[in-house]
Image (cartoon, coloured by chain):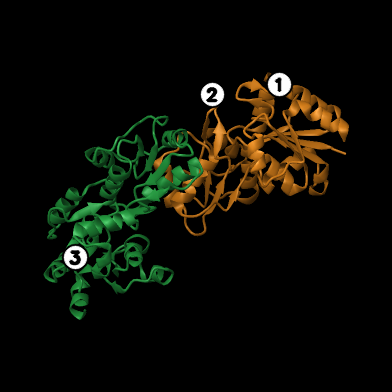
Chain colours: A orange, B green
Amino acid sequence: MVSGAIVDLDGTVYRGDDLIPGAAAGVDALREHGCGLCFFSNNPTKDGAAYVDRLRELGVDAREGEACSAGVATARYLADHHAGDPVLLVGDEGLAEQLRAADVRLTDDPAEASVLLGSWTNDFDYYDMMAAMDAVEEDTVFLGSDPDRAIPYDDGRLIPGSGAIVGALARTVGREPDRILGKPSDVARDLALDRLGLSAADAADCLVVGDRLDTDLLLGERAGMTTVLVLSGVTDRADLADSDVEPDYVLENLGEIGTLLRDE
Amino acid sequence: MVSGAIVDLDGTVYRGDDLIPGAAAGVDALREHGCGLCFFSNNPTKDGAAYVDRLRELGVDAREGEACSAGVATARYLADHHAGDPVLLVGDEGLAEQLRAADVRLTDDPAEASVLLGSWTNDFDYYDMMAAMDAVEEDTVFLGSDPDRAIPYDDGRLIPGSGAIVGALARTVGREPDRILGKPSDVARDLALDRLGLSAADAADCLVVGDRLDTDLLLGERAGMTTVLVLSGVTDRADLADSDVEPDYVLENLGEIGTLLRDE
């Protein structure tokens, strides 16, 4: 019995500004099947409410509290584990706002920082690398908001994502991050299960649907969820053949999810 | 019989704007011993002539043609192996000038580039990462000018070097560079031996003196040269104890080289 679904957004429900054909019907089918829904974007710059608004504008039946993001996961992790610790953020103002709203303490002073957080920002430059080098001592906690190296831009081309910037910081300070939040992390998994009202023991009753093998599908595979790859985003059948992650189901798009639920 | 010496500059002859005590006398001792001299900086932004001028200003007996740099090695490699190929440089204008002087063809257009060259520049930003992502296809040659991750700044603090920027580009495009020039590369070794009028078979007659285990000393160790670590730069005895590279001699500074030559 499927009781919850973690549904990726970019590449799964929409692509840039356009709804993927069938996606709204797929969401309806999940709901009719009695599934709880957690829409989860690995974009760290917006919070859950922004995604609910965006989905509604596109004609998708999304309800308050049903969406979250790598930004939400990052803010929650910092609030839970680094309350009061000065955090040097190399990232976007959209993430900074989410962190401030969660009472995370941000600092611009590398000498004061005990946490370095890397994330996507198109303001990234050499002086951020200098600040990271100044901030990172042996006991500095180094985090990344999400691992996505390349992200689709409006015109379809790929541009550097958080993963590229976190990687740039890693190569600057000479060590890898201690933890990367967002999908496929345990923090993202637990956040999604919480939103669905499920415990880790219920993971087998949860679907995860997405277009990325290394984030959406890997999260689901590790947690023992039923994994569904959609081919409407960044992954094609050739990528799938090369992958260590093996989805339980492969659909052309989210619109086909109804068939899968009926066959269950 | 020592017939040639490759002498590092920053941390070996000078530190920032200051001559390291004894360094001028050390250079004189090498010359009196009949050693040919090749001063070699891993800073890619200046050419050999600039270093000869700088050494003379500091009171060191340096002669025309005796200095080279990671910039010289990079320009030579590109002229020898990529003549006419459009090169997208993410690096400093000082390196661009050396490349143009060597008739390397530079381009600002990622779509046209067949070589991506990463190097130090404090102008590095997100748009360079975008350009690299646009430029790099499967057959694009990806080069770095030198591997130095952290470099000493005038005030003694470390700032990100070419290695950090090349690493940032590597994490952006999702693959490591095909080749990194400067020390300890074979290209740098061959350039230095050429300048000294020595062949690879003569390497055993060559000293390499420097303050960095992973560049100066590694170049010498791989080539079968006599390696001399000076403790006047970035390496202390604790670093040495942790290192796989084992210098033949360890001196407090270049001023002690005369003793070593007399004992030979």
Which label is found at residue A147? none
Which label is found at residue A155? 2
Chain of the residue under the numbered disc 2 shown in the image? A
Q: Is residue B26 above or below residue A231?
A: below
Left or right: residue A52 versus residue A113 is right
In front of the other: B87 or B126: B87
- The C terminus of chain B lies in quadrant: bottom left
- The N terminus of chain B lies in quadrant: bottom left
Q: CA separation, marks 3 and 1?
A: 72 Å
Q: Indicate the amino acid at tag 2.
A: Asp
Chain of the residue under the numbered disc 3 shown in the image? B
x, y percentage for residue B45?
Answer: 27, 45
Task: Assign a secondary structure to mark 3.
Answer: helix
Q: CA separation, marks 3 and 2?
A: 58 Å
Quarter of the rendering containing residue A236: top right
Per the image, the residue denoted by label 3 is B23
x, y percentage for residue A79?
Answer: 63, 46
Task: Assign a secondary structure to mark 1.
Answer: loop
Per the image, the residue denoted by label 1 is A21
Given this view, does label 3 or label 2 mark the residue nearer the observer? 2
Q: Is residue B52 above or below residue B37?
A: above
Q: Indicate the amino acid at tag 1.
A: Pro
Q: Indicate the amino acid at tag 3.
A: Ala
Residues flagged by tags 2 and 1 on a common chain: yes
Residue located farthest toward the bottom when viewing the structure as drawn: B263
